[in-house]
Amino acid sequence: MAKHRGKKSARELDPYKAREAKKYDNPIPSREFILDLLTEYGAPLGIASIAEQLNLFEEDDLEALRRRLNAMERDGQLVRNRKNDFCVVNSKDLISGRVIGHKDGFGFLKSDEGGDDLFLSPRQMRSLLHNDRAVMRVVGVDRRGRLEGALVEVLERNNHKVVGRLHHEGSVGFVVPDNKRLHLDIVIPECDLAGATHGQMVIAQIVEQPTKRSQPVGRIVEVLGDHMAPGMEIDIAIRTHELPVDWPEAVVEEASVYGTEVSDAAKEGRVDLRNLPLVTIDGIDARDFDDAVYCEVKPKGWRLLVCIADVSSYVTPGSALDSEAQARGNSVYFPDRVIPMLPEALSNGLCSLNPDTDRLCMACELYIDKEDGRIIRSQFFEAVMRSHARLTYDQVAAIVVERDQNLRSKYSHLLTHLHELNALYKVLHQSRSLRGAIDFDTTETRIQFNDEQKVEQIVPVHRNDAHRMIEECMLIANVAAARFLQRKKLPALYRVHAVPSEQKLTDLREFLNELALGLSGGKEPTAKDYAELLDSVQGRPDRHLIQTVLLRSMAQAVYGPDNVGHFGLAYPEYAHFTSPIRRYPDLLVHRAIKHLLAGGTAEDFEYSYPKLQVLGEQCSSTERRADEATRDATDWLKCEYMLDKVGEEFDGIITSVNSFGIFVELNQIYVDGLVHITALGSDYYRFDPIGHRLNGERSGQVYRLGDSVRVKVAAVNLDDKKIDFILANSETTDEANSQKPKRKSKRRKRAKK
């Protein structure tokens, strides 16, 4: 290797030297160059040997190399062996990724580079917790055909404080985590109970992480109190998922430096759009406005301007604001509050496109064909704008659809622009159908609170044409951003939605065959094949069932540097560009576009492919964290809402079928609960996973996904956030309940033997 490189400096050989020189005053070879070196060498190397291979001998260079190697190890690109030498992590023998825990003790490793998850047995999970990052080696295939992993090294511990309920037994306490993915209880020595008593909700700081031979050990750092207090459910969700809430002092200071108004210096060199009647259109309760639109008719179609708050002008790489935004990943929206990604001085101030105020923006200008809604041409540029109105979805729908005369008079100067937006939306919506984008008919809900912050009711959110109008504008701007980055071959973070897996498609086709239906497209169906099937079953009574099964056959959308397209939206390229106030990936896309506008190339770009891989996983992880936190809080609130309804009967729809029972969503209330298989009667029920049903062997009774049933609320468990239903049939219920003591009695007898 040394002979191969000769006396020439590694800095000169590094193809990414321009990028490194831009980032550092005295740069050392890039991560990519180091990985190539280790891969070519084909064996582990210690830090001294790596330095020799790179011709690095100065003390400052050696310290920089040590830090870089440690960072690469932390990010899962390298791993140390027992001799403290560095090895390249690759998908053939070693796999780095994030641990996904399961309440039953086993887990999975989600690889940083994609592909199938590794199954982790309870034995391997003894020294791991959910969300830890680790390196695994493949040790075989389990009896279910899954690749099985064994722990090589823990890269990063991501559970530092755990929220749960304290159980005091003798001279020791145990905190049972509220997050059920954390499968290990936290041992609390008596001297570290901090006055907490049995049954209280507490926060435990982990002082010793789990090992193969011992559970995690912690100490109580905060007593939250009774779990029924108003707002407690959100406080618990925030702490359970370790959502950053408080702003570091350095972040607050950086945000305050910019003041409250855009300076004249910041406006220089930008396209002036202040006279253009751009408007924001959002929900009535929105507080930050990160997108504004304008539309005018042209001979061949329309000119559409989508202007997005220029967050990247204030949040720069390496700053305290950037580090905090990256750690948060996204804003988190709870039923009664928001945890923003950026401080309020930016999110509701300088980066919010408030009406009649100068604001910096990134503009996407699109010319769209009037016949098929395709993009004729597009360009991006930095601009300064003034929003001419803050409109709500309901107002716009009333103006362009219902033709409310009072609103039309008030906003007469915007009527032409709004009507062209509506005309453009209709063409884009038609193009969406022709393209084959999948449009599932799902119901979103909103929780309404009374004056005491208790749940008053759960109501559906109705979408109108104004919602869809803005959605189509944002979609086409996102597509334009992805195409621009793809065309320039710049490493970037895409929003990717992979095609359904082969196994999922096999199961889906078996299910459809039973209904005398088929999915076209052969082994590689497209979104259009899905959409055509959905259209064909619109009039069927089992439409809800078919739609649910189709939805569950699809993969989850994530962020990554590999542009594999967006299956659900039927786009060959797609990125998130339109919400940099609340999503970090959008901020990264803005930086990439600005880099290209400034004449930059891939070689001198701040972000390399490996770095974007790590950031993609990070952003996907924070997105999942936000979803889980809001779901936990919402499930708690729904349980609390149902506490005084035990014994009442409701009609509902079966939303899920498992081997242990059926889940039912109550009509008009939008609350889910479980009817356990033991509450279905005295029959023996066999689970059919392909048909999504339980079949009674003796009675022939079938419970299938999408069926209507009437249930009674049997119990509500706030600790587990679960609601138990029984069928509203006293005879069936009595038979089911009468069997339980008998089975328990048999278990006790066997245990005594």
Image (tube, rainbow, N blue to C red):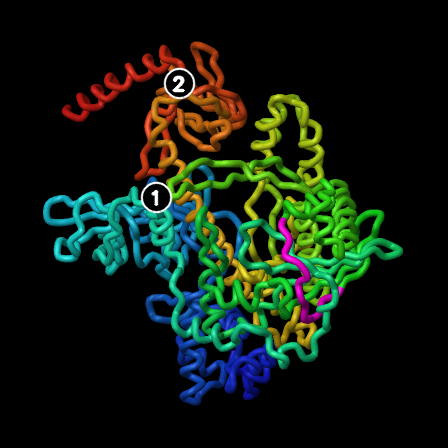
Q: In which quarter of the image is residue 10?
A: bottom right
Q: Where is residue 557 in the image (x, y as percent from the top left)?
A: 57, 49
Query: Where does label 1 land, which residue?
Result: 180
Residue 462, above or below 706: below
Q: Where is residue 153 in the image (x, y as percent from the top left)?
A: 36, 60
Q: Tell me what residue is drawn at x 61 percent, y 68 percent.
A: 310
Q: Where is residue 327 in the image (x, y as percent from the top left)?
A: 45, 63
Q: Residues within 10 Å of mark 1 (few under 14, many from 20)?
A: some
Q: Using the image, tell me which numbered label, if any, was put on residue 89.
A: none
Q: Distance between the residues labelled 1 and 2?
A: 27 Å
Query: Where does label 2 land, which residue?
Result: 680
- Work out whether residue 273 or residue 105 is closer to the camera in this orientation and state it: 273
Magenta part of the chain? 379-392
Name the outermost residue toward the left.
Answer: 171
Q: In which quarter of the image is residue 160?
A: bottom left
Q: Position of residue 555 (x, y in %)?
A: 56, 44
